[in-house]
Image (cartoon, rainbow, N blue to C red):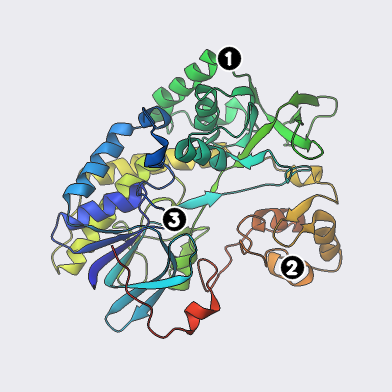
C-alpha cells in the first residue's frame, strides 16, 4: 500500500515526526527494525518477561506514555521487524527496501512520496588490550540488556569511557542489583564547568544521577581511563589509571579493579548510511538539515541523532518540526512552524554542543594499544597489522582497509573505523556504503519484492 510519508526509525524522533505528520492529515508509515516501537531510549522488555515496573528502567516515562498512546490512537501504519537496507528514488517519490523478521531473508518494500530519516546513532568504540574478552560489553549494550531483557551482564561491573550515557548505565546497573565497582570517566569536572551556561538546564538531571550514584555508593574516578582488561576465558578485572592534562596516562597511577563486567563507551556517532546513499549532504558526521529539518535532497527530511547526537529531548523537538514540515510539503500548504519546538531545539542544540565538547576521548588513547590488540573484530586485524600498513604508506582508513581488510567485515567498519583512523593518525571520515545492512544475494536478484505487511 503506497503511503505519503515513510518514517524510518521508531525512536523518539521518528515517533514525534510520525504523530505530527499524521495529525495534519498525511498518510504515514512508520518502519523500524525492532519488534516494538520506542528505539533504544524507550526500549521495552518483551511482554513474556512480565516486567512489573518497566518505568523504573526509564527516564521521562510519562513522555513515552504520551507517545505510545498517541501512536495507538493515530492512523499511523506501523511496520516493525522491518530492517531497512536501502531507500531508492523513483519517478513517483521513493521506495523503502527492507528485510523482514529476525532471519532478514524475505524482502519488503514501501512506496512513499516522501521519506523522513530518524535512523538514530550507534556507539563509538575505542579498543584497548583485552576488550575482546567475554564480559566486556559496550555501555549501550549493557543498557539494552537491562531494558530489553531485564538482566544485568554480571555481578560486579565497571562502567568506563566518556560521555553522558555512562551515568544512566551505571545507575541502572546499580539499581538492578549489580555492584558497580567504579564509574571511570576520562573527562574532568573542569570541562563541564567551562560550559556552565549552556548546560544549566541539565543540572537537575545531573544532580539526580549524582544522588543515585551516592546512594548506591558507586565510586567515580574522573580523568581516569581503562588501560587494559584481564582474564583468561573471561573478564576478571581491569587496570585503570589517571590521565594528565594532555590526556596521557600518568605513570604510577595504575590500579586493579576486580570485576566480571566492563561496560565501556566513548560517545555515539550518527547513523547516516541511508542518507548518504540518497545523496544527502553531511555536515561532519551528521546529516545536514535546514531550519525545517529538510535535507538537500527534495522530499527527504532527517531528525534525531542522525543529524547530530543530542539525546531524546532534542530528537523529540526535531522530529516534531520535521513531521510538520513534511506534512506541509505533501499537502502543498504553507510551512507550519512550531515556535515552542523551535525554541526548545535551539536550547537543546546548545547543550548538545557543550556536552560534545566536554566529553571527548583522551587525545592519546591509541598509545596504550599493544600490537596484538585486535582492532577489527570481524576480520581479526590487529593493531600491529594496522601500524604496519601505516609504515607502508597508508595514511587514511581506505588504504588501511585495502592493505589489512580492517573494516571489510559484517559491520563494515562501524565498530573499528574510529580506531583505525586513530592508529593511522588521520581524522575519521564517514564511509559511504551502498547498503545500510548486509543483504542476501537472493533478495537483490528478485525484481519485485513483496510489499511490507502491518
Q: Quadrant of residue 28?
A: bottom left
Vertical relation: 330 (above or below) 418 = below
Secondary structure of the residue carrying tag 3 is: helix
Q: Quadrant of residue 294?
A: bottom left
Camera-side mark, 3 or 2: 2
Q: Residue at x 23, y 39 (%)?
A: 66
- Residue 231 x/y as whole percent: 80, 36
For disc 3, the marked residue is 306
Camera-side mark, 1 or 3: 1
In three-dimensional space, the C-alpha distance between marks 1 and 2, rounded to whole angstroms, equals 45 Å
Residue sitting farthest toward the front: 48
Q: Can you say which quadrant of the picture contains the N terminus?
A: bottom left
Q: Can you say which quadrant of the picture contains the C terminus?
A: bottom left
Nearest to N terminus: mark 1 or mark 3: 1
- Residue 42 x/y as whole percent: 38, 41
- Residue 86 x/y as whole percent: 44, 71
For disc 1, the marked residue is 217
Q: Residue at x 69, y 64 (%)?
A: 397
Question: Foreground: 51 or 381?
Answer: 51
Secondary structure of the residue carrying tag 2 is: loop
Nearest to N terminus: mark 3 or mark 2: 3
Q: Residue at x 15, y 54 (%)?
A: 23
For disc 2, the marked residue is 405
- Residue 243 x/y as whole percent: 74, 31
Q: Number of labelled discs?
A: 3
Q: Are marks 3 and 2 in contact (CB under 8 Å)?
A: no
Please indicate whether residue 151 sits to the left or right of residue 64 in the image: right
Please indicate whether residue 75 sits to the left or right of residue 409 in the image: left
Q: Quick check: can you spot residue 364?
A: no
Q: Are marks 1 and 2 in contact (CB under 8 Å)?
A: no
Amino acid at each position: 500500500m503506497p503511503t505519503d510519508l515513510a518514517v524510518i526509525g521508531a525512536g523518539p524522533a521518528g515517533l514525534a515526526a510520525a504523530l505530527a505528520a499524521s495529525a495534519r492529515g498525511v498518510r504515514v508509515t512508520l518502519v523500524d527494525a525492532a519488534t516494538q516501537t520506542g528505539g533504544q531510549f524507550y526500549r521495552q522488555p518483551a511482554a513474556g518477561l512480565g516486567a512489573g515496573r518497566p518505568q523504573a528502567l526509564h527516564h521521562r516515562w510519562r513522555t513515552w506514555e504520551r507517545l505510545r498512546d498517541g501512536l495507538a490512537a493515530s492512523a499511523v501504519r506501523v511496520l516493525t521487524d522491518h530492517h531497512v537496507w536501502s531507500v531508492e528514488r523513483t519517478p513517483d517519490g521513493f521506495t523503502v527496501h527492507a528485510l523482514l523478521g529476525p532471519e532478514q531473508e524475505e524482502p519488503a518494500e514501501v512506496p512513499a512520496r516522501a521519506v523522513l530519516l530518524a535512523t538514530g546513532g550507534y556507539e563509538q568504540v575505542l579498543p584497548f588490550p583485552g576488550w575482546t574478552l567475554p564480559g566486556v560489553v559496550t555501555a549501550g549494550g549493557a543498557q539494552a540488556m537491562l531494558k530489553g531483557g531485564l538482566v544485568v551482564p554480571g555481578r560486579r561491573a565497571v562502567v568506563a569511557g566518556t560521555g553522558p550515557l555512562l551515568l544512566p548505565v551505571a545507575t541502572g546497573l546499580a539499581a538492578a542489583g549489580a555492584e558497580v565497582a567504579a564509574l571511570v570517566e576520562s573527562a574532568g569536572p573542569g570541562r563541564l564547568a567551562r560550559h556552565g551556561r549552556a548546560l544549566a538546564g541539565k543540572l537537575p538531571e545531573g544532580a539526580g544521577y549524582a544522588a543515585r550514584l551516592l546512594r548506591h555508593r558507586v565510586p567515580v574516578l574522573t580523568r581516569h581511563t581503562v588501560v587494559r582488561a584481564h582474564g583468561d576465558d573471561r573478564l576478571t578485572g581491569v587496570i585503570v589509571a589517571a590521565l594528565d592534562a594532555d590526556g596521557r596516562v600518568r605513570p604510577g597511577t595504575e590500579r586493579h579493579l576486580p570485576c566480571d563486567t566492563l561496560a565501556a563507551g566513548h560517545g555515539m556517532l550518527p547513523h547516516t548510511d541511508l542518507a548518504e546513499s540518497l545523496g544527502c549532504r553531511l555536515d561532519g558526521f551528521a546529516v545536514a538539515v535546514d531550519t525545517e529539518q529538510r535535507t538537500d535532497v527534495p522530499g527527504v527530511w532527517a531528525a534525531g541523532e542522525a543529524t547530530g547526537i543530542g539525546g531524546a529531548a532534542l530528537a523529540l523537538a526535531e522530529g516534531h518540526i520535521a513531521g510538520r514540515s513534511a506534512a506541509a510539503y505533501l499537502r502543498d500548504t504553507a510551512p507550519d512552524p512550531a515556535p515552542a519546538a523551535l525554541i526548545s531545539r535551539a536550547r537543546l542544540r546548545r547543550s548538545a554542543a557543550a556536552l560534545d565538547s566536554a566529553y571527548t576521548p583522551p587525545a592519546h588513547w591509541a598509545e596504550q594499544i599493544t600490537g596484538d590488540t585486535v582492532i577489527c573484530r570481524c576480520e581479526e586485524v590487529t593493531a600491529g597489522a594496522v601500524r604496519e600498513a601505516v609504515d607502508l604508506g597508508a595514511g587514511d582508513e581506505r588504504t588501511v582497509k585495502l592493505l589489512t581488510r580492517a573494516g571489510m567485515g559484517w559491520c563494515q567498519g562501524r565498530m573499528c573505523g574510529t580506531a583505525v583512523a586513530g592508529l593511522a593518525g588521520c581524522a575519521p571520515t564517514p564511509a559511504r556504503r551502498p547498503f545500510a545492512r548486509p543483504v542476501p544475494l537472493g533478495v537483490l536478484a528478485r525484481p519485485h519484492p513483496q510489499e511490507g505487511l502491518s
